């Protein structure tokens, strides 16, 4: 299996995030990608290649054009406003009762206008990392479209919390959604997105919620008690022509392999019934028992079993890296899924 990786991700470093009342160092840091890449190489999964450069037209198929155009301007606007702090973060949002139909001019307000939380910081190198992450996903999608059984997009920053016009949860451009739309535009009649990250892929759901050509399935922590809180309930099954094509599997804290794998089996059965031409897997490994910001109980030995189950689906698969924050084990677990798939 080929892995696509860009060293430009490393420019998105030294970030801060607003979480639980504290401004803290970001858990989403460059070492995540480096550990995974090192494991890909040590396990001899296959060649690691650089991404091709793509324009932003593919991203603008799933995101609002004004939102995508805003992202490369954040740091220059932040500096122009005279800010000297280490990271650009929002501190005000147009919530219920406030106006969200008027785009403000001030960068401080624009950051809130285009986000849903304080977990998508910008530093000087953030935009290049965002763009390279999207390039990684599109390059890997091209490999699959050209006949590869599977490819691994080692994306950083991740993407599944980014919606059509908002960032959050470490995510800016929704790499999996961009890739799914790219497959549709290049001949795939149907695409399934299987999101196995601990946190609900709220951005992916929002983007495709009214569509029947992209099926979205999320296995995740119960939003009644876990981030991102405001989406991911079992009764969210799509809207309009998309009704019946969105499936959520919220699970309680402490979920271990038996319950989690039963949800995976059900999701895979739904994928098989849908009959996609390609499957995009949002690969989060923050379901791991030692993950510092998650509360599931999967073990390293479980991750190859996930890959093996996905391989039994049959269609070609694009793996897109999302979350996972137990840095010492993230490479073992992420690559475990891939080797499980390859060994099937």
Image (cartoon, rainbow, N blue to C red):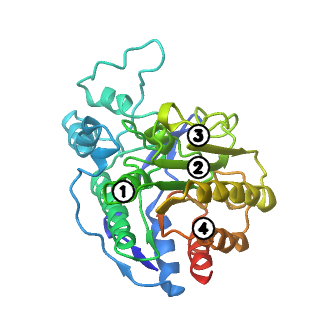
Cα separation, mark 4 vs mark 2, equals: 14 Å
Give the residue at mark 1: 12
* Earlier sequence position, callout 1 versus callout 4: 1
Residue pictured at 61% horizontal, 38% vertical: 232
Q: Is residue 58 left or right of residue 210?
A: left
Q: Secondary structure at mark 4?
A: loop
Mark number for residue 313? 4
Give the residue at mark 2: 217
**Between tags 4 and 2, which lies in front?**
4
Q: Secondary structure at mark 2?
A: strand
The answer to whether marks 3 and 1 mark residues whose Cβ atoms lie closer than 8 Å is no
Residue pictured at 36% horizontal, 69% vertical: 145
* Earlier sequence position, callout 3 versus callout 4: 3
Residue 179 versus residue 313 in the image, above or below: above
Q: Position of residue 203 (x, y in %)?
A: 47, 42
**Between tags 2 and 3, which lies in front?**
3
Residue pictured at 32% horizontal, 49% vertical: 123
Cα separation, mark 3 vs mark 4, equals: 20 Å
Residue closer to the observer: 333 or 118 = 333
Q: Position of residue 277 (x, y in %)?
A: 46, 62
Mark number for residue 244? 3
């Amino acid at each position: 299996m080929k892995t696509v990786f860009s060293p430009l991700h490393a420019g998105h470093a030294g970030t801060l995030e607003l979480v639980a009342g504290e401004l803290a160092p970001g858990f989403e840091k460059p070492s995540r990608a480096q550990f995974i890449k090192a494991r890909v190489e040590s396990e001899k999964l296959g060649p690691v290649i650089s991404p091709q450069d793509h324009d932003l037209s593919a991203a603008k198929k799933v995101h609002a054009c004004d939102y995508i155009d805003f992202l490369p301007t954040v740091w220059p606007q932040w500096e122009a406003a005279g800010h000297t702090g280490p990271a650009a973060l929002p501190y005000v949002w147009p919530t219920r009762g406030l106006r969200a139909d008027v785009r403000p001019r001030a960068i401080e307000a624009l950051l809130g206008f285009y986000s849903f939380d304080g977990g998508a910081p910008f530093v000087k190198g953030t935009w290049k990392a965002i763009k390279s992450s999207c390039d990684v996903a599109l390059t890997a999608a091209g490999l699959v479209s050209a006949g590869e059984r599977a490819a691994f997009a080692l994306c950083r920053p991740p993407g599944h919390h980014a919606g059509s016009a908002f960032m959050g949860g470490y995510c800016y451009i929704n790499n999996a959604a961009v890739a799914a739309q790219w497959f549709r535009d290049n001949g795939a009649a149907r695409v399934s997105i299987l999101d196995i990250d601990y946190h609900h892929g709220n951005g992916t759901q929002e983007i495709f919620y009214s569509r029947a050509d992209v099926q979205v399935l999320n296995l995740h922590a119960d939003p009644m008690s876990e981030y991102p809180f405001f989406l991911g309930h079992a009764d969210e099954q799509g809207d309009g022509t998309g009704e019946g094509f969105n499936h959520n599997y919220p699970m309680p804290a402490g979920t271990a392999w038996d319950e989690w794998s039963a949800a995976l089996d059900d999701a895979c059965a739904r994928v098989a019934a849908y009959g996609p031409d390609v499957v995009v897997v949002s690969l989060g490994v923050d379901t791991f028992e030692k993950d510092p910001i998650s509360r599931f109980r999967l073990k390293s030995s479980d991750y190859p079993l996930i890959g093996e189950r996905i391989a039994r689906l049959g269609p070609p698969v694009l793996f897109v890296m999302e979350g996972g924050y137990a840095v010492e084990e993230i490479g073992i677990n992420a690559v475990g899924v891939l080797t499980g798939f390859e060994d099937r």
